[in-house]
Amino acid sequence: MDINLIITLFLLGFIGSFISGMLGIGGAIINFPMLLYIPAMLGVGHFTAHEVSGITAIQVFFSTIGGVLVYRKGGFLNKTLITYMGVSILLGSFIGGFGSTHMPESGINIVYGILALIAVVMMFVPKKGIDDIPLDQVKFNKWLAALLAFVVGIGAGIVGAGGAFLLVPIMLTVLKIPTRMTIASSLAITLISSIGSVTGKVSTGHVEILPSLIIVIASLLASPIGANTGKRVNTKVLQMVMGVLIFAVAVKVWMEIL
């Protein structure tokens, strides 16, 4: 593998995983378009949408491990929320990951674009007062959480994502979970979800081993740094950064599709 491609992959993995740890997302919403477009744009390599979805599935798994380890102390991990949404999204992501092998590349990109568009709308819905709720008094509809996580899992499994870029808006807007608990719990849920995505991709031979290994090394270094940064940043700023990020990605993906 060309040294320029190795350096490019490492930097892309580092950037994606830093943002992943900070915002409580798996990183696929950032790394999918970056891996699809930037290596080709720089002339150092080219990956198909199927290959990128396989690489991002592996990256999401390892980047979320780093984030969860940072957030495990402080009461930010809601175990009930993680259990209900984690099991549901695992089932959905396995179905989506296996089913994606029967879809054309254009179909994978369209699913990704639709998911990003839904996430954008939800991120900009007002979320008044959710961060005033004490962490030990957080309540939510368990079965609604499970149903939404299952649907997210199917779509996320198709594009090799952990689904957190959709989980975060759902947890903030629909379930009314405080921001830092949302970030910490979504990392744990995405970790569980990515098991389904990785299993589906590996079992069907859609994982490029060496590029994935480079991305994993970058993820293990960058994700804990991002998570520690996120713990110190104002929650309104975190919500705004997430909204802008998802909006930018949605615009880029739909420009390519159209």
Image (cartoon, rainbow, N blue to C red):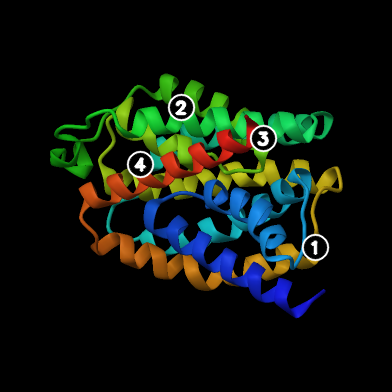
In three-dimensional space, the C-alpha distance between marks 2 and 3, rounded to whole angstroms, equals 14 Å
| Quarter of image, res 19 | bottom left
Upstream in sequence: badge 3 or badge 1: 3
Q: How many C-alpha atoms fall within 10 Å of the one at disc 4: few (<14), some, or many (≥20)?
A: some
Residue 74, placed above or below residue 119: below
Judge by depth and name the residue closer to the eye, 233 or 7.
7
**Image quadrant in which you'd find residue 220:** bottom right
Q: Quarter of the image containing the C terminus? A: top right
Q: Is residue 40 left or right of residue 123?
A: right
Q: Residue type at mark 2?
A: Ile
Residue 209: numbered disc: 1
Name the secondary structure under disc 3: helix
Amino acid carrying label 4: it is Gly
Query: Looking at the picture, which amino acid does disc 1 mark?
Result: Ile
Q: Nearer the viewer, mark 3 or mark 1?
A: 3
Give how far apart the Cα atoms at labels 1 and 2 are: 32 Å
Estimate the spatial distance between the alpha carbons at disc 2 and disc 4, rounded to whole Å. 11 Å
Residue for point 72% across, 68% down: 213
